[in-house]
Amino acid sequence: MKMIRGDNPLAQWRLANKPDRQTDLGISRWLEAAVAPADAVWIETEFEKWLADRSRTVPDLVECVGRYGYTRLLIQGWTKVPIDIEPADFDRWRAANYLPTIEDFHDQLAGVAGGFLELAGQAPVLTSDIIRRQIDEKLSRLDSILLLPLSDFTPREMSDAELEDGDDSAEQDRFDRPFVVRQQLECFEWAMERIRMLAVSEHNEELGLPNHSLYEALMTIDLNALLVRLRRSDDGLRRILQHLAKFQYYQLDSDIAPESFWWRHWKSSRPKR
């Protein structure tokens, strides 16, 4: 692999290798997968602060667990990152905040899961109570958004000045609200299935594992009921996407999202003319 001198190894690699579109998509997914665990670690830091001072704002533990699940789903089935990196260059890529191997991802994710379990283990029942309440709040928010009239999801023509002000991005964020909640809860459910098993299957004295009290507390989170509620919301989500498709509005699609996120691959299922 020929490299070009400079500070950013990925930029160097792109210049030297001229990746095709499929490789570019793989790179985008690789970079996306590396961001989510860092977000989870930040929430864990806020959780640690909250455990020490309950007057602080309660962190979003559903989002924390969901970010772990999101990365797991993005790299599911991968045996290597999407570009060839010489082992001798691994440390250089790591120094530039890239994860050059799948083992790097596994190590990072193990740290996220271990950090959550260690903190949750300090207050198992309270942690599960918070999570259940946050799930209910998110589901209620999702239901409320789905009750909005379709006029709230109708794209409008924008002037050049509005586009320069970022009004189109604000509109996209507004349209995307129910799909963000849907995705977050999907990732949370997938991750919690695994994380609560780690509470009793892992043996790590420093993290206080195994922790049977934590396992029992996390088992009170009804993931089957969550899945039922999510599936029940899907018709409402499809209704919004079908409405947006009438205006050829496909900005909510994402080529790098896991295939199971059908709400991110709507464009591919549009009728052919």
Image (tube, helix red, strand yellow):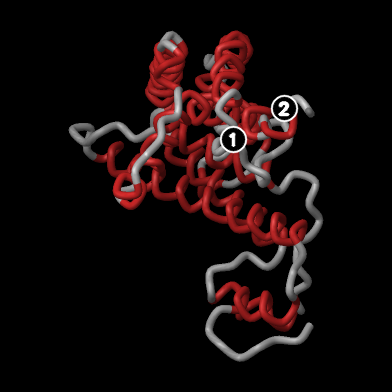
Q: Indicate whether 116 appears above or below 9.
A: above
Label 2 is placed on what type of residue?
Arg
- In contact (CB < 8 Å): disc 2 and disc 1: yes
Does residue 14 appear in this view? Answer: yes
Amino acid at circle 1:
Tyr
- Looking at the picture, how far across and down is residue 247, in whole percent? 55, 28
Could you tell me which secondary element the residue under label 2 belongs to?
loop
Question: Where is residue 227, by image quadrant?
Answer: top right
Q: Which residue is mark 1?
A: 250
Residue in the picture at 39% in, 34% down: 171
Residue at the extreme left of the image, as rendered: 55
Position in image of residue 113 (x %, y %) = 56, 43
Which residue in the structure is indicated by mark 2?
270
Residue depicted at x 63% and y 81% = 12
**Does residue 132 lie above or below 23 as drawn?**
above
What residue is shown at x 53% (from left), y 48% (from top)?
A: 36
| Quadrant (top left/top right/bottom left/bottom right) for the C terminus | top right
* Label 2 Cα neighbours within 10 Å, binned few <14 / some 14-19 / many ≥20: few
**SS for tag 1?**
loop
* Marker disc for residue 65: none
The part of the image, by quadrant, that contains residue 4 is bottom right
Question: In the image as oriented, which residue stretches furthest toward the bottom?
Answer: 5
Q: Position of residue 262 (x, y in %)?
A: 68, 28
The residue closer to the viewer here, 262 or 135, is: 262
